Image (tube, rainbow, N blue to C red):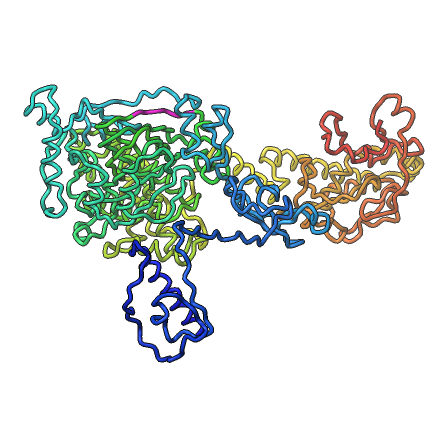
């Protein structure tokens, strides 16, 4: 410790001496001793010989053995010593450290999981540093024979953009991480994507009214109101104040901005900036920075990364305004399309077009007390802020809602696909496809229209239209969503697509089910169903209408009809009337779901649906039944649904509710299944004419049999001997062809059972198919239910069987007693029932082979009755699939 203090004091004294020497030009020291710090040591300075008076001023605390030397002060400044680079790791691939180089990210390292050596990224075989993120276990070339190849982590099945197709068109291969824009932008710019020529209407604002839309069915395709037909109010004032052609933007903008000051804003006051031709109010000179001040700098917003079409981390409006004003070619392209401002200061400055306010279903049916409490779906005003080359891929607005779209600044380009059934199906499949990012939807639909909008233009987009949006330059847009009565069909189609694609609830129209219930309730309240009409439906009758209700524009037809229920509270458009059945089915399914009669519904979803049904308006099921009768009344000339009757039985538990409309293919398939089911129940069912004919034939056979028996008993012994002398087989040939019919009568088929008659031949495999399927020559589906007929299942002999037995020779049946429990098991040496050992196949006789016909003779050349009774099968009708089945015995 003492040594450290001595060294410190010596260094301090040296500095002082050097300073004194610099001040004294003649290098002379003062004779008087300099003051020194008091020391606690009284050690002498013996042994030291220093010239000058410095001998007396030396610090007495310094030990005597420590010499005190004064050196010359160097004028050169000492160099700072560089820290030596400490080499910790050497790359096993290049055997260098490469601590600092121009390789950048390639100077990062990766360790081999086998030998534990470290490698540079490029030495390990990787081209980019980000490729290492996907590595699970890395093995170098030396360790691969022992441990195997490098393994990678599992990636998502959804495809992501990996190639910049815009640069690829120019012949440059770049990854998407090296490009800031979406890969569809350049093909749109250079015309690689070809679109159909659009013919959408351009309308003057005076024609955009509720009455015109309801009576003309115009709102079925996008409608554009150009800026030149709908000039902004401040432009008119500017022209009046400064004259035509004079730009007075600066002074007018200053006045507007003063009114937009957030500090002096009053919620209840709406600045009257003047309405345009659509009765729409938009602030003049609105900027993104002013939006930030009016809505709130700390308001959280969802910012979309255009390249990936995904929402990243939450931003606030202040950060977004800084990004929007930032200038630079390399900044990432981002987009904001979901900022709802209806409950902010900016929302108080806005007013939607009058058409939108008139046909908005939510504004019409939502209770005012709920609106006063602030409990209503907030979709009226969206502020969309997009930088140049922003792109939103194809989508349908939530709930099939319609959209109004006004451009305050910049330009927008829309790509529209109409809501045809095949296009909606393709959209649903494309939305779930893992190749969605690589597949341009118009290449599937082969129908897409391009519409370019500029500053001041207004666009009305109807329900269900699939569209994408490109932003050619920085833009600021005010828009909003709304439901309407003229689009019931498309709105419910889109809701079903959202359910099929399992769209999250945050991306669906808020309180959609509750709005539909409020709609049905308002129909019943404002235009109640007359009791006489209800009774008419209960009696199974219809409410007849000669002219549809939508054709009565002025109500004159209803006034001339004196029947109760002929009048209407208001005009109902054609699109509204045609969509009412879809609303009925939606309401009824909601009721069935709450009652637990829809399969596959969780308890949580059932609870949410129950909450969406308004309370205090009656029992939901009774409301649904009454509304179904109301719809049948308004539509006219149709029956209400069966479940709407008071005594109707609802579908059993776990059923899907009301049946859906089936296609023609489904209907034909259903009819075929019903026909097959009926055939299985009664396979031998025939028409009344055929049954009468067969009954007459059986009666004739019975009569002939009785006559033959009497004649045989009354014949003389001579004649009897003569009969006995005849060859037995000659008499048997006369009835050989009737044998299968008699066997069928002895063992009839039972209704509802699948029977299989055993084969009368020992050739081929055992018969396992039922008789019904075998006759129709189809694959039997009842092999597990087939019942093999046995002698115990035979029926008592009928008159036909008695006649058959009477005509046989006595030599053939003298030892055979035909009873219900005793049926011959063999006939002419051939077993009828049961299994017998197989014997070799017999060849056809020479005569049959020569004539090329089916052989009906036995080995002795005599006619085999069993073969003769079998029905011949034409060669042309034999299926190719049955080629593996052996042919009939004796076939040519």
Considering only vertical position in the picture, is 574 above or below 53? above
Region of the chain picked out in magenta, as a range: 447-452
Q: Position of residue 703 (x, y in %)?
A: 72, 38
Q: Nearer the viewer, residue 102 or 685?
A: 102
- In-image side of 467 versus 377 (left or right): right
* Foreground of the two, 475 or 524: 475
What residue is at 47 percent from the left and 40 percent from the top?
Answer: 432
Residue 76 in picture, x, y percent from top left:
40, 49
- Against 616, residue 269 (above or below) is above
**Which residue corresponds to the image point at 45% horizontal and 69% vertical from the top-left?**
67
State the image coordinates of residue 680 (x, y, percent, origin top left). 61, 43
Q: Nearer the viewer, residue 430 or 68?
A: 68
Q: How many marks?
A: 0
Q: Quadrant of the C terminus?
A: top right
Rendered image quadrant of residue 270 = top left
Which quadrant of the view contains residue 601?
bottom left
Side of 220 relative to 868 (left or right): left
Where residue 205 appears, as percent x and y from the top left, is: 18, 26
Which quadrant is the N terminus positioned in? bottom left
User: Magenta includes 675?
Assistant: no
Name the quadrant containing residue 891. Answer: top right
| Image side of residue 198 versus residue 529, left or right | right
Q: Is residue 719 visible?
A: no
Please give the name of the residue rendered at 62% of the width and 36% of the height, measured from the top-left corner. 691
Q: Is residue 410 above or below residue 320?
A: above
Give the camera-side residue of 661 and 115.
115
Could you tell me if residue 40 is visible in this image?
Answer: yes
Identify the residue at horizontal 83%, vertical 48% (top origin). 835
């Amino acid at each position: 410790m003492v040594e450290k203090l001595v060294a410190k004091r010596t260094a301090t004294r040296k500095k002082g001496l050097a300073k004194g020497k610099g001040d004294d030009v003649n290098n002379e020291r003062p004779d008087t001793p300099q003051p020194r710090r008091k020391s606690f040591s009284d050690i002498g300075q013996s042994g030291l010989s220093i010239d000058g008076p410095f001998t007396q001023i030396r610090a007495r605390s310094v030990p005597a053995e420590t010499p005190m030397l004064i050196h010359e002060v160097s004028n050169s400044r000492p160099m700072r010593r560089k820290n030596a680079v400490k080499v910790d790791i050497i790359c096993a691939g290049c055997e260098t450290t490469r601590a600092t180089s121009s390789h950048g990210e390639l100077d990062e390292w990766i360790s081999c999981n086998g030998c534990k050596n470290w490698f540079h990224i490029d030495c390990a075989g990787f081209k980019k540093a980000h490729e290492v993120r996907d590595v699970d276990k890395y093995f170098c070339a030396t360790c691969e024979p022992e441990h195997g190849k490098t393994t990678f982590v599992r990636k998502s099945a959804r495809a992501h953009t990996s190639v910049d197709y815009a640069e690829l068109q120019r012949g440059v291969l770049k990854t998407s991480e090296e490009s800031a824009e979406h890969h569809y932008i350049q093909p749109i710019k250079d015309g690689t994507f070809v679109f159909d020529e659009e013919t959408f209407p351009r309308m003057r604002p005076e024609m955009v009214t509720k009455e015109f839309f309801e009576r003309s069915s115009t709102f079925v395709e996008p409608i554009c109101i150009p800026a030149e037909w709908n000039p902004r109010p401040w432009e008119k004032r500017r022209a009046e104040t400064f004259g035509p052609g004079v730009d007075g933007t600066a002074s007018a903008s200053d006045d507007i901005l003063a009114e937009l000051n957030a500090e002096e804003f009053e919620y209840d006051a709406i600045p009257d900036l003047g309405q345009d031709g659509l009765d729409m109010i938009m602030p003049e000179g609105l900027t993104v920075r002013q939006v930030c001040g009016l809505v709130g700098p700390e308001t959280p917003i969802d910012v979309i990364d255009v390249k990936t079409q995904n929402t990243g981390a939450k931003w606030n409006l202040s950060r977004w305004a800084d990004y929007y004003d930032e200038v630079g070619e390399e900044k990432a392209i981002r987009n904001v399309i979901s900022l709802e401002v209806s409950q902010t200061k900016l929302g108080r400055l806005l007013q939607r077009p009058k058409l939108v306010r008139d046909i908005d279903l939510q504004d019409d049916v939502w209770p005012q007390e709920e609106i006063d409490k602030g409990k209503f779906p907030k979709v009226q005003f969206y502020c969309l802020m997009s930088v140049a080359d922003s792109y939103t891929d194809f989508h349908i607005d939530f709930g099939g809602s319609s959209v109004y779209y006004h451009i305050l600044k910049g330009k927008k380009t829309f790509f529209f696909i109409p809501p045809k059934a095949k296009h909606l199906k393709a959209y649903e499949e494309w939305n779930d496809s893992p190749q969605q990012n690589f597949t341009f939807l118009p290449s599937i639909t082969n129908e897409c229209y391009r519409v370019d909008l500029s500053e001041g233009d207004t666009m009305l987009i109807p329900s269900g239209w699939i569209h994408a949006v490109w932003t050619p330059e920085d833009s600021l847009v005010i828009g909003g969503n709304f439901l309407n009565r003229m689009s019931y069909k498309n709105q419910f189609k889109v809701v079903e697509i959202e359910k099929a694609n399992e769209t999250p609830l945050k991306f669906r129209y808020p309180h959609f089910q509750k709005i539909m219930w409020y709609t049905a309730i308002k129909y019943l309240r404002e235009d109640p169903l007359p009791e006489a009409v209800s009774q008419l439906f209960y009696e199974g009758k219809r409410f007849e209408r000669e002219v549809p209700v939508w054709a009565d524009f002025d109500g004159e037809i209803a006034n001339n009809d004196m029947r109760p229920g002929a009048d209407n509270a208001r005009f109902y458009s054609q699109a509204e009337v045609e969509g009412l059945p879809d609303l009925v089915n939606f309401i009824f399914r909601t009721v069935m779901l709450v009652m637990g009669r829809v399969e596959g519904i969780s308890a949580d979803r059932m609870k949410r649906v129950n909450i969406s049904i308004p309370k205090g308006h009656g029992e939901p099921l009774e409301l649904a039944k009454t509304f179904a009768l109301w719809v049948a009344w308004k539509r006219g000339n149709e029956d209400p649904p069966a479940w709407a009757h008071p005594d109707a039985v609802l579908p059993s538990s776990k059923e899907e509710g009301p049946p859906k409309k089936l296609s023609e293919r489904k209907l034909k398939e259903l009819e075929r299944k019903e026909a097959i089911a009926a055939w299985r129940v009664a396979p031998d069912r025939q028409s009344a004419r055929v049954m009468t004919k067969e009954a007459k034939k059986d009666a004739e056979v019975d009569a002939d049999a009785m006559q033959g028996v009497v004649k045989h008993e009354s014949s003389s012994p001579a004649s009897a001997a003569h009969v006995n002398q005849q060859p037995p087989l000659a008499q048997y040939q006369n009835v050989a062809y009737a044998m299968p019919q008699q066997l069928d009568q002895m063992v009839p088929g039972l209704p509802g059972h699948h029977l299989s008659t055993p084969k009368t031949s020992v050739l081929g495999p055992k018969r396992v198919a039922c008789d019904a399927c075998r006759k129709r020559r189809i694959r039997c589906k009842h092999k597990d239910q087939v019942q093999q007929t046995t002698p115990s299942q035979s029926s008592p002999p009928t008159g036909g069987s008695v006649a058959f037995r009477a005509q046989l020779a006595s030599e053939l049946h003298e030892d055979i007693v035909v009873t219900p429990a005793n049926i011959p098991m063999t006939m002419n040496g051939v077993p009828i029932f049961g299994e017998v050992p197989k014997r070799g196949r017999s060849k056809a006789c020479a005569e049959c082979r020569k004539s090329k016909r089916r052989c009906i003779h036995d080995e002795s050349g005599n006619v085999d009755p069993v073969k003769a009774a079998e029905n011949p099968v034409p060669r042309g009708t034999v299926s190719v699939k049955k080629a593996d089945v052996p042919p009939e015995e004796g076939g040519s």
